[in-house]
Image (cartoon, rainbow, N blue to C red):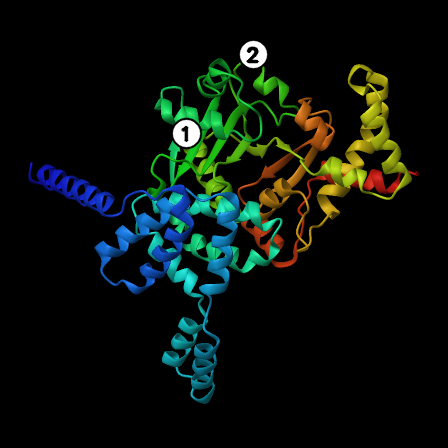
Amino acid sequence: MAQSNIAFLNELLHSVGSRMRQNRFAKPSREKAAVQIGKSCADLLRRTGEASQIAVAEQALAAYTQLTEDEKLQFFQSLLHDYGAEPAEVRRAFATWDADPTQSALAALFNAVEPKRQSLLRALNQAPGATLQLVRMRQDLLRLIRKTPDLAPLDADFSHLFASWFNRGFLVMRKIDWHSPAAILEKLVSYEAVHEIRDWDDLRRRLDPPDRRCYGFFHPATGDEPLIFVEVALCHGIPDAIGPLLSERQQSAEHPDTAVFYSISNCQPGLKGVSFGNFLIKQVVSDLSGELPHIRNFATLSPVPGFAAWLVAQSDPEAERLTAELQEADWQSDPELRDRLEPAVKGWAAQYITQAKNETGAPADPVARFHLGNGASAHRLNWPGDLAESALARAHGVMINYLYEHDRIEARHEAFANDGTVACGPDLRRTLKQHRTTPA
């Protein structure tokens, strides 16, 4: 009873405090928001009292929601230029450390080189619900940074803070099923990023049958707002096409031996680059292994979203001919043509997965980067694996299975992290070898 009363009093005090702050700091008009957020941010770093800091942080975040796109750009530029490290302080701290490299001098140097905007973001994060607002603020920044790459140092500050705030140890995994709260189910429909959920019947087919599982990953600071959804199908063998898994006439597997991750949706674009992958895959595998000890294989059925764009960019006559045939010929209704094209499609896709790199030297394909970096192997290419319009446009219908082998995950993760080793299964190695030896 005493605990219940304490909880009630805490809630009451929070409510009263919130109303007082709302009265003191009324929501800014759109016209004043750009000025207001600048004043609030400057004020926030001067204040030391927790209550006043929370109030000013709420005011600043409320003003941010009223900014236009141009005003957001100006705000980010202000953070970049007005809230950096002080060069004179950095020089003094470095000189002190250089003369006498003690631990305290090193700590002072760390403090000097840290941009003041990191302290500002921490102060903003004191407001109730601020963490999710800052995630969405970074989503805006990532959108604007495409046209204004000079903002990259500001994004590095967001990334640095989010890496600690969203430490995987804070994540909570929840099973999602047809009886989960409607608000969570609506978010699953809204955030599904791989295979669109068309309606409630489609959603039920993914959650209700005994051979389906769904997991959501949440963070205490974001409440019921999910970070990631993972959808799983239990099957006989590793599937080679998404259609049967999503079909209205799907049949449940009675004695499945394989768990297939067929959709992993990142719900918060503002957390791009913050890694949860190895943790969440391990969590799901652990849960499934405990519930279903007869499951032997853990694999994905994944898209290859960058393949079509990469193929069309190749200055190779064979690649050019293949692109033209895939775009112009009606291979979907011509089995003979499809059989003729299949070796070339899979061969070029194998080359893309294993050899195409981005500017950092990592695999160019984002899905490959995710799974290979988390200790999976590129197991098998499937064509046609997905005939949805979006999949045809992005990958000519190619899909791939990544295989998670429990006793090899750590070694493959380390090899990928240390020297970029792309682990390949026998099937994909065979496809790649045949592609290399096939005359143009």
| 199, 91: nearer the viewer | 91
Residue 146's spot in the image, x, y percent? 61, 48
Q: Is residue 373 left or right of residue 4?
A: right
In the picture, the disc for residue 256 is none
Q: Residue furthest left?
A: 2
Residue 401's spot in the image, x, y percent? 64, 33
Query: Which numbered disc, 2 or 1, marks the residue that appears first in the sequence?
Result: 2
On the image, numbered disc 2 is attached to which residue?
A: 248
Select label 2 or label 1 by which is in front: 2
Residue ID at (66%, 54%): 420
Q: Amino acid at mark 1?
A: Glu
Q: Residue furthest bottom?
A: 99
| 62, 256: nearer the viewer | 62
Residue ID at (59%, 58%): 150
On the image, numbered disc 1 is attached to which residue?
A: 291
User: Which image quadrant: the C terminus?
Assistant: top right
Residue 396, placed above or below residue 33: above
State the SS at label 1. helix
Residue ID at (41%, 65%): 116
Residue 118 in view of the camera:
yes
Q: Residue furthest front?
A: 31
Q: Is residue 17 left or right of residue 213?
A: left
